[in-house]
Amino acid sequence: MAILLPFNTQGGQSTEQGQLALDEAIKRLLDSLAQYSPQAAKADAQGAVNLEVAKHQLDILPQLARATEAAGTSGGSMQALLANQTLAESAQRGAAVGADLAARYGAVSAAILGDTAQVSKASSDLYAKLQADQAAAALESTKLQMDIIAKEEERRQQQNQFEQKRRDYQDQLQVLSGRPWWA
């Protein structure tokens, strides 16, 4: 049983949305698995067994009646013998139906468990990718902060250089004019 995941981890949706979709897929698979539990298999098998036994007995009743009539005086013995044989055949047919149904339930359960394992692995992989993405985003944020700090420091140095040049020019102006620049 293949499962189609409702998201694309290569692009289109974020990893958080993908994780939510995986979690929902796992929940649906586990809900499906509950429908194929041993208890459900037993209940369904019992119904199928009862139906097969009843069908077989209805099919054999006319033959049983004819055989009893043909037996004449030993009809009672013949009827008991045929009834026992019919019950044994019905039980065998019922057991075969039950075993077949149990095997089918087992196959469905195994397929669902396989899909659950695949989805769980995809969920783990997606979680690891999410962690890596978060680490990369934190690193990028740190780099941006360091760039901002470096640019701010560069701006301060330029401001200091500008202020120093302004003072130097004012001092030169004072020397050239013979009076303070502020006067």
Image (tube, helix red, strand yellow):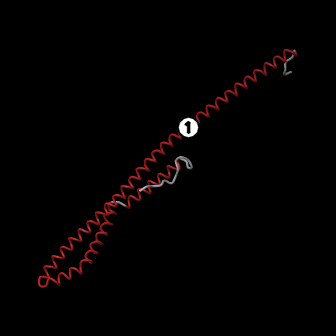
Q: Nearer the viewer, residue 175 or 100?
A: 100
Query: Does 101 sit above or below residue 171?
Result: below
Say which residue label 1 marks: 138
Query: Does 54 sit above or below residue 128?
Result: below
Q: Which residue is located at x 44 percent, y 57 percent?
A: 28
Q: Nearer the viewer, residue 102 or 138?
A: 102
Say which quadrant the N terminus sits in.
Answer: bottom left
Q: Viewed as shown, does residue 28 lie left or right of 134? A: left
- Residue 131: x %, y % from top left: 50, 41
- Residue 136: x %, y % from top left: 54, 38
Q: Viewed as shown, does residue 16 lie left or right of 179? A: left
Say which quadrant the C terminus sits in.
Answer: top right
Q: Viewed as shown, does residue 128 lie left or right of 101? A: right
Instruction: Report the amino acid beneath label 1.
Output: Ala
Q: Which residue is located at x 15 percent, y 76 percent?
A: 81
- Residue 171: x %, y % from top left: 81, 17
Q: Nearer the viewer, residue 177 or 99?
A: 99
The image quadrant of residue 53 is: bottom left
How many numbered discs? 1
Query: Does 151 sit above or below residue 170?
Result: below
Q: Mark 1: few, some, or many residues within 10 Å (few <14, many ≥20)?
A: few
Q: Which residue is located at x 64 percent, y 30 percent?
A: 149
Q: Nearer the viewer, residue 122 or 89?
A: 89
Task: Find numbered disc 1 in the image and state the secondary structure of the residue it sits on.
Answer: helix
Q: Which residue is located at x 56 percent, y 35 percent?
A: 139
Which residue lies most toward the front here?
A: 70
Which residue lies most toward the left here?
A: 73
- Residue 6: x %, y % from top left: 51, 54
